[in-house]
Image: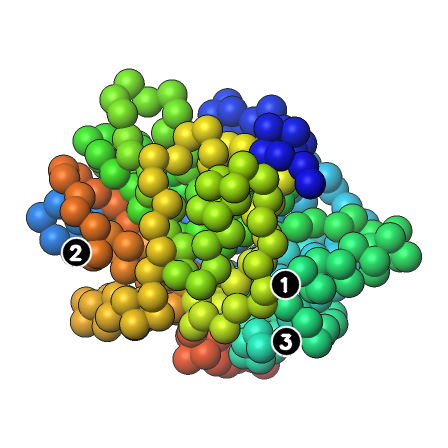
């Protein structure tokens, strides 16, 4: 088994994140920091185009690679993001989705003109099928997290946090495939003051914490956590060395804690999806000091997706 040290290294740095920010600026929205308490802010990626931070990585990768066809595996949000960019650039997109993933997200992907392929297994089987389809068709395979351009694009979330909350001391980041966590780690690396980066994983899918403890990538069985966007079974080869080097802490949160965080968010008018509430769940169970930011990574609830689909139909009718 490969150790973390021998896993392929990305060579990525904060400069890549800054270049990505310039490259994608015309396609992404600079999302707001929302005050939840005197020292707790929320990075509102639920307000991003496509409903999640995933548009950042997808846009950065596709603008550089300029593919003629793309295949990806996704629990939903990355697929929506790739399909959105594909529709804008007239690039055919196929999204492979694992068993148990959201049918509302599958419909949103199809509504953007992409093809959806379902597999019976979990995330590992999903990625194997996506690679196979790409190999057979000659399309570009674009992982949801495990790609340097995707990581750099996701890292622009961290750049915006650092610029808009210059006194930030801690950032809580939801952790599934690890692209967002690795990107935030890169983004804050060159700041002139220390910023703690805390990755928050669902309690039964702690692939990063377990892999770092083991000194080698660990693959977990498929998970049923309500945070459907964070059900990955294995850490990414690109994010893992970055996370291992820079993350300050990795914590786990139960589904009950995620539900509690969802309630807090909805109490202030933020309709986050469960994956989008994971970072806040981590902040709520931790003792943080100073100005703290929790990333609300997505808001693609069935209700939001249904409303978005209706709006697209109305625009088409006009």
What is the secondary structure assignment of the residue under circle 1?
A: helix
Total marks shown come to 3
* Residue that badge 1 annotates: 123
Say if residue 280 shows up in the picture: yes
Classify 173 as above or below 240: below
Q: Is residue 245 left or right of residue 148?
A: left
The circle drawn on residue 99 is 3
Crowding near the residue tagged with mark 1, few <14, some 14–19, many ≥20 C-alpha atoms within 10 Å: many
Where in the figure is residue 199, as x and y percent of width and height? 38, 46
Question: As drawn, is 99 to the left or to the right of 297?
Answer: right
The earlier-in-sequence mark between 1 and 2 is 2
Image quarter of residue 198: top left
Of tags 2 and 3, the one toward the viewer is 3
Q: Secondary structure at mark 3?
A: loop
Q: Residues within 10 Å of mark 2 (few under 14, many from 20)?
A: some
Q: Quadrant of the C terminus?
A: bottom right
Question: Residue at the location (43% across, 67% down)?
Answer: 227
* Residue neighbourhood size for the residue with mark 3, other residues' Cα within 10 Å, grouped as few (<14), some (14–19), many (≥20): some
Residue 117 is situated, as x and y percent measured from the top left of the image, at: 74, 72
Image quarter of the N terminus: top right
Q: Residue furthest top?
A: 192
Identify the secondary structure beneath mark 2. loop
Instruction: Work out whether mark 2 precedes mark 3 in sequence or the reverse, and give the earlier one.
Output: 2
Q: Position of residue 215 (x, y in %)?
A: 54, 37
Which one is closest to the eye, mark 1 or mark 2?
1
Task: Please give the residue where the numbered disc 2 appears in the rendered image.
Answer: 36
Observer-nearest residue: 246 or 148?
246
């Amino acid at each position: 088994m490969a150790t973390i040290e021998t896993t392929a290294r990305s060579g990525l740095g904060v400069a890549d994140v800054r270049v990505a920010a310039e490259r994608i600026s015309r396609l992404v929205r600079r999302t707001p920091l929302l005050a939840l308490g005197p020292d707790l802010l929320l990075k509102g990626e639920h307000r991003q185009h496509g409903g999640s931070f995933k548009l950042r990585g997808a846009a950065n990768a596709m603008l550089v690679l300029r593919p003629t066809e793309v295949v990806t595996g996704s629990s939903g949000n990355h697929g929506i993001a790739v399909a959105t960019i594909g529709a804008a650039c007239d690039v055919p997109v196929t999204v492979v989705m694992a068993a148990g993933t959201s049918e509302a997200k599958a419909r949103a992907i199809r509504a953007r003109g992409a093809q959806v392929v379902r597999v019976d297994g979990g995330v590992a089987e999903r990625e194997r099928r996506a690679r196979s389809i790409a190999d057979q068709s000659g399309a570009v395979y674009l992982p949801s997290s495990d790609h340097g351009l995707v990581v750099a694009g996701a890292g622009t979330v961290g750049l915006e946090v650092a610029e808009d909350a210059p006194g930030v001391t801690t950032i809580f980041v939801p952790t599934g495939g690890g692209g967002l966590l690795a990107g935030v780690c890169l983004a804050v690396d060159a700041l002139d003051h220390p910023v703690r980066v805390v990755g928050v994983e669902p309690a039964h899918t702690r692939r990063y914490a377990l892999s770092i403890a083991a000194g080698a990538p660990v693959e977990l069985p498929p998970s049923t956590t309500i945070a459907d966007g964070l059900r990955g079974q294995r850490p990414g080869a690109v994010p893992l060395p970055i996370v291992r080097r820079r993350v300050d802490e990795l914590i786990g949160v139960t589904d009950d804690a995620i539900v509690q965080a969802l309630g807090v968010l909805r109490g202030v008018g933020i309709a986050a999806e469960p994956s989008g509430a994971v970072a806040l769940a981590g902040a709520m169970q931790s003792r943080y000091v100073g100005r703290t930011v929790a990333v609300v990574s997505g808001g693609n609830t069935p209700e939001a997706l249904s409303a978005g689909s209706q709006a697209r139909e109305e625009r088409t009718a006009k």
